[in-house]
Structures are given as structure tokens and as C-alpha cells.
């Protein structure tokens, strides 16, 4: 858990007294995740390899598809003023994570009940699409369902932001690999690829 001094510094940043984008506060998300056994199945070890990229993008609002236990959304909150995160399952751990890190007022979770792995994509998107269409955001992170149709559909919903980071671009998920190759992502890490409009 963060000590009270670090929480105070962070809260000052949130209200604008310390909000210099080039010096975003390190919330210690990775340490927190390790201390609470939340690293497994999280993207955080891979996201930490692209810290410089995330800082350089000067993100205002991010969309995170695939919340799971909230670690990736917490990591993104170090670089964005707001994170809008979507998942098909409401894992309870994330609320404690966000509260402990002092960021629960900056992360907005949407439960998309229609999303299931055995549904075709058009059925999965029906609840999420109107919400995402209504949001103003300048970055997206896709780590939801790992099949071709769902990754493609998630991308179609968020590509308007012009900057999309994909997780799990590995042979174990051939649909993710196939789709990201089709759109011409730049591979940043064994697990991560980045797409930018007109890049």
C-alpha cells in the first residue's frame, strides 16, 4: 500500500497543483501488484517497457479494453487524466487496487454484460460501442478477448483516437497476431505492438 505522503503528492497532482505531464507521478503500480500477488496474467511487466512512449504521447483520456483486476488501468492512470475501462466480468479486486492507489476517481469502469467468448463480435460490441462512441479519448489499450474477430472489432471501436497499443501479440494468440499484422503495427516488445494513424 502507498504511504500517506505519496498519496498526498499524488492527490495534489490530480487536482492540478502538480500536474506536469513530463513528470507524471510514479504510483508504484508494479510494486503494489507484486506485493498483492496481482502480476500474474497482468500486462504490467510488458507495459513498463513502453513507459517512455506513454509519457511522450501526453495522453488525456485513455480507453482500456480488458480490465481484469485493474492493474493495467492503474498503470495507464500514471499517464492519463482519465481511464475508461471495459470488461465482461466485474472482478472485485480492482476496486481495492484503485482505492489503495488513490485513483478510483480517475478510472471509470464499464461492465459489458453482452461480451462472451462464444458470441460473435457484433453481439459483443452492442453494449460497448455506444459508450465508446460517446467518449473523447486520445489513446487505447486493447487486451480483451484474444481472437481475430474480437480484436478487430475492438480496434474498429477505438481507432478514432489514432493511437492504439495491443497486448499479447504472440503465437499463442494467432488471431491477435494476424489482425495486428494486417493493420501494420510496430512491434515494441515481444508482447506489445503499437498502431498510430498515418504511421
Image: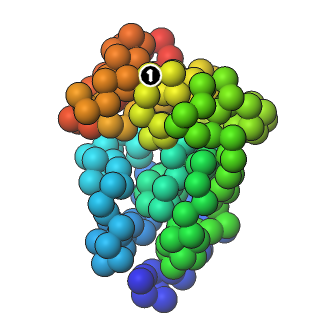
For the N terminus, the image quarter is bottom left
Q: Quadrant of residue 160?
A: top right
Q: Nearer the viewer, residue 20 or 30?
A: 30
Residue beneath the point at 50% across and 17% down? 197
Answer left or right for 133 relative to 124: right
Q: Position of residue 71 (x, y in %)?
A: 44, 60
For the C terminus, the image quarter is top left
Residue at the extreme bottom of the image, as rendered: 4
In the rendered view, tell whether residue 120 sits above or below residue 5.
above
Q: Is residue 197 visible?
A: yes
Answer left or right for 63 relative to 142: right
Residue beneath the point at 60% across and 60% down? 90
Q: Nearer the viewer, residue 80 or 46?
A: 46
Secondary structure category for the residue under label 1 = helix
Q: How many marks?
A: 1
Residue beneath the point at 74% across and 37% down? 127
Q: Is residue 17 visible?
A: no
Residue beneath the point at 43% across and 28% down? 147
In the rendered view, tell whether residue 49 sits above or below residue 71.
above
Q: Position of residue 143 (x, y in %)?
A: 45, 40
- Location of mark 1 (residue): 148
Q: Nearer the viewer, residue 154 or 84?
A: 154
Residue at the extreme front of the image, as rendered: 118
Scheme of image coloration: rainbow
Circle 1 Cα neighbour tier, 10 Å, few/some/many (<14 / 14–19 / ≥20): some
Q: Position of residue 91 (x, y in %)?
A: 55, 63
Q: Position of residue 34 (x, y in %)?
A: 29, 72
Amino acid at each position: 500500500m502507498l504511504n500517506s505522503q505519496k498519496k498526498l503528492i499524488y492527490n495534489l497532482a490530480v487536482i492540478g497543483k502538480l500536474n506536469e505531464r513530463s513528470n507524471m507521478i510514479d504510483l508504484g503500480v508494479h510494486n503494489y501488484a507484486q506485493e498483492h500477488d496481482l502480476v500474474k496474467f497482468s500486462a504490467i511487466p510488458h507495459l513498463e517497457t513502453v513507459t517512455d512512449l506513454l509519457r511522450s504521447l501526453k495522453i488525456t483520456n485513455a480507453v482500456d479494453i480488458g480490465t481484469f483486476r485493474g492493474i493495467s488501468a492503474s498503470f495507464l492512470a500514471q499517464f492519463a487524466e482519465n481511464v475508461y475501462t471495459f470488461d465482461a466480468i466485474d472482478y472485485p479486486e480492482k476496486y481495492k487496487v484503485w482505492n489503495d492507489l488513490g485513483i478510483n476517481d480517475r478510472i471509470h469502469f464499464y461492465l459489458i454484460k453482452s461480451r462472451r467468448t462464444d458470441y460473435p463480435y457484433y453481439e459483443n460490441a452492442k453494449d460497448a460501442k455506444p459508450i465508446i462512441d460517446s467518449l473523447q479519448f486520445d489513446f487505447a489499450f486493447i487486451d480483451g478477448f484474444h481472437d481475430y474477430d474480437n480484436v478487430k472489432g475492438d480496434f474498429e471501436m477505438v481507432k478514432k483516437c489514432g493511437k492504439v497499443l495491443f497486448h499479447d501479440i504472440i503465437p499463442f494468440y494467432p488471431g491477435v497476431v494476424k489482425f495486428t499484422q494486417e493493420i501494420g503495427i510496430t512491434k515494441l516488445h515481444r508482447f506489445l505492438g503499437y498502431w498510430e494513424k498515418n504511421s
